[in-house]
Image: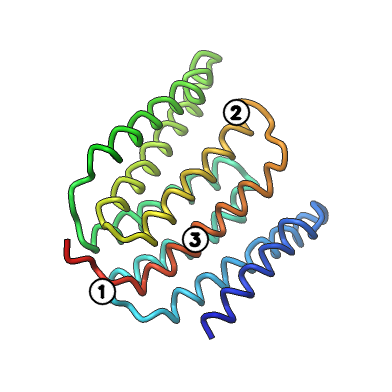
Amino acid sequence: MRKVLLTLIGVMGFIYIFLIPEDPVGMKIAMKLVPMILIILYGALNKSLISPLYKRTVLIGLSVCMIADAAIYWFMAGLATFLVGHLFYIAAFRKASRKPVPLIAAVPLLFYGLFMAVWIAVPQLVSGELFLSVAIIAYMAVILLMGWEAIRTRLPLVITGALLFICSDSLLAIDRFVTPLPARDALVMITYYAAQTFIAASIGSRVPDV
């Protein structure tokens, strides 16, 4: 059943990204949510090998992100809802094995966060968009913390999902605030659906011994 769901996630994701027109918007939003519903079901069918609380928290995070998928059409509402979803992921990852973040991962992650803040948030501040710049920095801090906690789990599926999520959000931010990206929708949504699938699959991960 889980293999069937993975196939359906891929198929429905492809249909949404490449075949569904922008209008009517209601249909676009509805089709956008279908892969997320399948991802949540896939996660629910995974046997929790970390803890039942980890599974419940991840499923809540996935559900909040699904709501954010619709809310993002109203940008600030979507941003706030995704931030809440990331807080659930952070809480979930802290339930898994917690090890120090190695320097080889910590330095690039922190440098990347600083670079993106300077590149995206600072110009908004300079242009007088104080609230927006603060919101961007807050969101970036939360998603980087999510990546940080993912690395501490030492779980490959968690780490891959978190890094893909950071990639997806970064592409969206660059397109919105810096410069239009060719094939933005495809790039953002492919990395996004992949990220959520890896995070859902992590429910079945075993906590590493080291």
Residue 161: give x, y in percent of width and height: 44, 56
* Cα gap from disc 1 to disc 3, whole angstroms: 19 Å
Disc 2: CA contacts within 10 A as few (<14), some (14-19) or many (>=20): few
Query: What residue lies at 45% left-to-right and 74% top-to-bottom?
Result: 43
Disc 3: CA contacts within 10 A as few (<14), some (14-19) or many (>=20): many
Q: Please state if 1 lies on the left or on the right of 206 as rendered.
A: right
Query: What residue lies at 41% left-to-right and 79% top-to-bottom?
Result: 46
Q: Nearer the viewer, residue 65 or 18?
A: 18
Q: Earlier in the sequence, mark 2 or mark 3?
A: 2
The residue indicated by pointer 2 is 177
Residue that protrudes farthest toward the bottom in the picture: 1
Tally of numbered discs = 3
| Occupied quadrant, residue 49 | bottom left
* Cα gap from disc 1 to disc 2, whole angstroms: 40 Å
Query: What residue lies at 61% left-to-right and 70% top-to-bottom?
Result: 9
The residue indicated by pointer 1 is 51
Mark 3 residue type: Gln
Query: What residue lies at 50% left-to-right and 43% top-to-bottom?
Result: 167
Residue 44: give x, y in percent of width and height: 44, 78
| Occupied quadrant, residue 93 | bottom left
Residue 190 vertical placement versus 174 (above, below): below
Determine the secondary structure under disc 1.
Answer: loop
The N terminus is located in which quarter?
bottom right
The C terminus is located in which quarter?
bottom left
Disc 1: CA contacts within 10 A as few (<14), some (14-19) or many (>=20): some
Residue that protrudes farthest toward the top in the picture: 126
Mark 1 residue type: Ser
Determine the secondary structure under disc 3.
Answer: helix
The residue indicated by pointer 3 is 196
Q: Nearer the viewer, residue 202 or 32?
A: 202
